[in-house]
């Protein structure tokens, strides 16, 4: 598979998204989770046709996203999804909030597994619940869920687990066995699992991704999957996410959500998602994965050359790298000095929890020469 080529940086700087507008042109932006590749042809055609028609009104009740996602899940994950058990909304974090409001009561505790996507720490209280931190276990060669401590939290009254699979920022794809064990615990203690699977389409070759709902019968009973095309196809600004269930009880919970939750789905998001999940976009996705695969390995080589004391494990999925720079003595939040002195914007490690002290998150969904220049700049600080 020929790797997808990123757009030239002078063209990218004409974009108006956060990645390209937050900092000046002297800064290389490798922080927020936007990629630098040209849009998939099927999406360009679909959105172009919508603009041509003036198709900019309200999102219909059945925009075709559920059926398209069911086909995608079958092709890419070997997972059979009932389209009738899917509803859409604005974005993944909004879906998480609405689900947590239904499966917890005010003041209930929700387990999160840091280091983890920073909004997790915000959406739990937004839903009226309280964060209970159960950090991932760092095994040296990778990370895994701390099932012993998660059980202790559930036994102590926690009512839900907010799972990130694949995990952001580590890129960990949790094993089927680990997910099934988590489901058994949740089932035993009457808790729910809400699984953010937004990075699942970007699972790399040689790694098997298991959708939480498919991990076991217990997972189907206790679980809610939240998914979107937004990370794999760079559609975050278009606003469309899916809430997926696999059991009558959980399906009733999702169907009980107010109609307004579904009305928040963006029409362009729905149109683009249908095109993204269609078979004709598979080749584009595979070409992007080929480019990301090369970059995740390239990053290891670049760090070894320019920042040899950095600790980095090649991720199982996605375009985000979790890098420990503690050895360089740049403080708890090395991204601050790196942006100021090297003119490279990386994501702040401590935002992902206190386990992120001394760390940065690097977005390698860019051109090889951009990644090379960014690491060279950071290396010049040593």
Image (tube, rainbow, N blue to C red):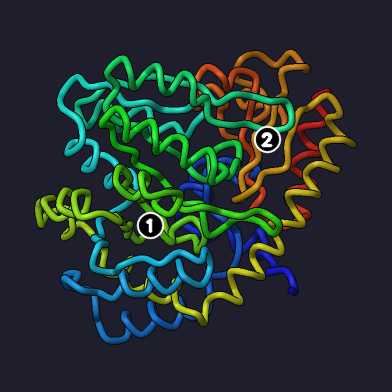
Would you identify the image quadrant in which residue 323 lies? top right
Mark 2 closeness class: few <14, some 14–19, many ≥20 residues within 10 Å? many
Q: Position of residue 140 (x, y in %)?
A: 73, 26
Q: Quadrant of the N terminus?
A: bottom right
Q: Residue at x 60, y 36 (%)?
A: 170
Tell me the crowding category of disc 1: few under 14, some 14 to 19, or many 20 or more residues within 10 angstroms, Cα based: few
Q: Which residue is mark 1?
A: 237
The tag earlier along the polypeptide, 2 or 1, is 1
Distance from Cα at disc 2 to Cα at disc 1: 26 Å
Closest to the camera, between mark 2 and mark 1, is: 1
The residue lying at 51 percent from left, 22 percent from top is: 135
User: Disc 2 vs disc 1: Cβ atoms closer than 8 Å?
Assistant: no
The correct choice, above or below, for 79 with respect to 26 in the image is: below
> Which is more toward the observer, 92 or 218?
218
Location of residue 254 in the rendering, given as x and y in whole percent from the top left corner: 19, 52
Taking the spot 49% from the left edge, 31% from the top edge, the residue there is 116
Q: Specify the quadrant that holds the C terminus.
A: top right
| Residue 46 pos. (x, y %) | 39, 81
Label at residue 372: none
Q: Is residue 88 left or right of residue 35?
A: left
């Amino acid at each position: 598979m020929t790797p997808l080529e990123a757009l030239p940086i002078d063209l990218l700087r004409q974009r108006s998204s956060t990645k390209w507008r937050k900092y000046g042109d002297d800064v290389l932006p490798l922080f927020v989770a936007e990629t630098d590749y040209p849009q998939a042809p099927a999406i360009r055609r679909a959105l172009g046709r919508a603009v041509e028609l003036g198709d900019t009104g309200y999102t219909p009740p059945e925009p075709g996203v559920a059926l398209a996602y069911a086909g995608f899940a079958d092709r890419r994950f070997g997972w059979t999804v009932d389209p009738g058990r899917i509803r859409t909304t604005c974005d993944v974090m909004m879906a998480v909030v609405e689900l947590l409001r239904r499966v917890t009561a005010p003041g209930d505790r929700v387990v999160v597994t840091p280091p983890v996507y920073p909004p997790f720490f915000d959406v739990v209280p937004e839903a009226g619940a309280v964060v209970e931190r159960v950090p991932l276990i760092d095994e040296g060669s990778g990370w895994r869920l701390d099932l012993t401590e998660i059980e202790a939290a559930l036994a102590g009254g926690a009512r839900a687990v907010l799972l990130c699979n694949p995990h952001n920022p580590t890129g960990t794809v949790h094993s089927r066995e680990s997910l099934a064990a988590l489901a058994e615990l949740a089932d035993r203690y009457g808790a729910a699992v809400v699984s953010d699977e937004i990075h699942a389409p970007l699972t790399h070759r040689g790694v098997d991704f298991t959708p939480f709902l498919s991990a076991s019968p217990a997972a189907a009973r206790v679980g809610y999957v939240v998914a979107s095309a937004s990370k794999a196809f760079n559609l975050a600004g278009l606003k469309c996410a899916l809430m997926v269930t696999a059991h009558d009880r959980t399906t009733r919970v999702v169907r009980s959500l107010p109609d307004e939750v579904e009305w928040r789905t963006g029409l362009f998001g729905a149109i683009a998602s249908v095109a993204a999940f269609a078979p004709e976009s598979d080749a584009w996705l595979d070409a992007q994965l080929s480019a990301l695969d090369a970059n995740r390995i390239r990053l290891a080589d670049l760090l070894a050359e320019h920042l040899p004391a950095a600790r980095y494990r090649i991720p199982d999925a996605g375009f985000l790298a979790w890098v420990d720079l503690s050895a360089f003595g740049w403080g708890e939040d090395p991204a601050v000095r790196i942006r100021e002195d090297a003119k490279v914007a990386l994501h702040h490690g401590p935002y992902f929890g206190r386990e992120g002290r001394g760390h940065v998150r690097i977005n390698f969904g860019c051109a090889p020469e951009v990644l090379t220049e960014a690491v060279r700049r950071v290396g010049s600080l040593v």
